[in-house]
Amino acid sequence: MNSEFIDSVDFKGHDFTVNRLDLADYEYCTFINCNFSNTDLSEISFSECEFEECNLSSVQLNNTSFKEVLFKNCKLLGMQFDQCNPMLFSTIFDSCQLNLSSFYQMELKNTIFKECTLHEVDFIETDISGLKFTECDFKGALFENTNLRKADFRSSYNYSLDPGLNRIAKAKFSLPEIKGLLDKFDIEIE
């Protein structure tokens, strides 16, 4: 736990690339239209905070805590979420760009993805069992030894995963996009 505690503060339009966000525990704070690009958020705890229209691309997340955190319309390119503190990790990603990010070996049972771009995101050895991905674009996303049991991909698209390399029992897929399960066979489906 950090020595400083910041509660219920609104940060609007701050450029944290110029003045770093203080090392602290943030609770019930909102960050609107803030720039964190390439900054270091290591060892900071966010609990029940909201980030809206923020740029958090390539932020360092060593032991960062996200507990019941909402990201809405945010740019989160190249984020290494697998470096976060896994204790009580709980996030909602709503209309976010998460391209080139990593959730390697994470348990994401308390995570929501809605209308997100997930190009080339690393879900290798990740537990996403039971998650519902609503209208997400998975172009180039990596799935290997991933627990996809009961996951719902029906409204999502551009996923490509090998059922032989992942656990997919009871997972839900839409008929037009089911071809993403057959990519390894290099066959044509019409």
Image (cartoon, rainbow, N blue to C red):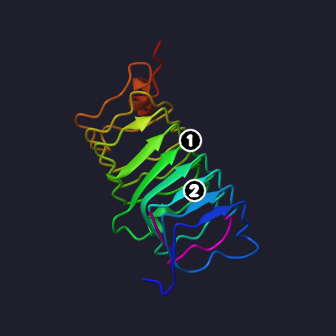
Circle 2 residues within 10 Å: few <14, some 14–19, many ≥20: many
Residue 87 vs 149, above or below: the answer is below
Instruction: Say which residue appears at 29% left-offset and 48% top-offset.
Output: 147
Task: List the single residue furthest toward the left.
Answer: 169
Q: Residue at x 56, y 80 (%)?
A: 23
Density class for disc 1 (Cα within 10 Å; few <14, some 14-19, many ≥20) is many
Q: Residue 96's x, y, as percent?
A: 57, 45
On screen, residue 185 versus residue 9, left or right, reads: left
Check if residue 51 falls in the magenta segment.
Answer: no
Tell whether 127 sits left or right of 179: left
- The three-letter code of the residue at mark 1 reads Ser
Q: Nearer the viewer, residue 181 or 99?
A: 99
Residue 82 position by quadrant:
bottom left
Image mark for residue 95? 1
Label number found at residue 51: 2
Q: Which mark is residue 122?
A: none
Name the residue located 46 percent from the left edge and 31 percent from the top edge. 156
Q: x%, y% of residue 37?
A: 69, 63
Q: Which residues are magenta?
A: 36-47
Question: In this rendering, does residue 42 appear at all?
Answer: yes
Give amino acid for label 2: Phe
**Is 147 in front, or is 68?**
68
Quarter of the figure with the N terminus: bottom left
3D distance between C-alphas at marks 2 and 1? 12 Å
- In the structure shown, which secondary structural element does the residue marked by tag 1 occupy? loop
